[in-house]
Image: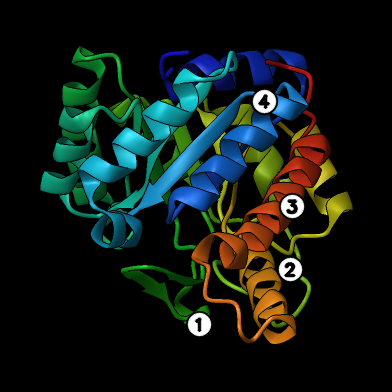
Amino acid sequence: MNLVSLREVLEPAAEGGYAVGAFNANNMEIVQAIIEAAAEENSPVIVQASQGAIRYAGLDFIVAMVKAAAGGVKIPVVLHLDHGTDYEQVIRCIRYGFSSVMYDGSQLPLEENIAMTRRVVEIARAVGVSVEGELGKIGGTEDDVTVEEREALLTEPAEAVRFVQETEVDALAVAVGTAHGPYKFEPALDYPRLQQIKELVSASIVLHGSSGVPDEAIKKAVALGVTKFNIDTQIRQAFVQAVSAYMQANPEDIDPRKILAPGKAAAKEIIKEKMRLFGCAGKA
């Protein structure tokens, strides 16, 4: 199946009362794990590549791998740029075949964030590519973007209204208490703020830093209208732990295929669990 835009999977999610998982991929095995999990769960899926992943694997390799994997299944697959802070790179991703991009201007003053995001929307929309923006600062580290906990600012509902109206983004990542990377403490989501934002804006609502958020909190966020959850840390943890366990048990093995296969299998199970939790399993 050809790649689809973010709008094409999030609009049915909003209508159906479920969310779609957005999973970060850094290598071939994780791309395969994401697509295979989605096919087995009959779920729409968003494959995300961060700026770090693009530097590691190469833009052309990322696109080729995802397109090859998506071409062999009959489910909706979105190829999405995660946390694009470089305008030129965002445009390159569109040119290379991403079906959705995120322009992250959350570190900029509001006026500049709106202006830059709007520029991306104008270009992307002309070629059928969806755009996600971000308002507020989500704590933690995501490749090139680091926000200290004391600097993390929650999204103001009134600013969210203005941002969406003036940029016309398809999706909005909001800061309501989640963080990138492993959690030191159980996150406390600001549900009233989330509910107010959802009631006021037309764009799909996205929660970044969803790895480690308790299942009941995820379910409540879905009930409040969140339609996209980003998962990265738990995939990395499962992958690395499985590979490490295999290497400890088989110290003489030098076959990369045997070493990496357990990592792929572990990542796949995490992804399938998340799809069931988000409610997108069976919705392809």
* Distance between the alpha carbons at the discs numbered 4 and 2: 31 Å
Decide which of tag 4 and tag 3 comes sooner along the chain: 4
Which mark, by number, is residue 187? Answer: 2
Badge 3: residue crowd in 10 Å (few <14, some 14–19, many ≥20): some
* Distance between the alpha carbons at the discs numbered 3 and 1: 31 Å
* Distance between the alpha carbons at the discs numbered 1 and 2: 15 Å
- Residue 168 in the image: state x and y as whole percent: 34, 24
Q: Nearer the viewer, mark 1 or mark 2?
A: 2
Who is closer to the viewer here, 134 or 284? Answer: 284
Picture residue at 84% right of the left edge, 42% below the top = 219
Q: Which residue is mark 1?
A: 150
Q: Which residue is mark 4?
A: 39
Who is closer to the viewer here, 142 or 164? Answer: 142
* Distance between the alpha carbons at the discs numbered 3 and 2: 20 Å
Decide which of tag 1 and tag 2 comes sooner along the chain: 1
Quarter holding the C terminus is top right
Picture residue at 70% right of the left edge, 13% below the top = 15
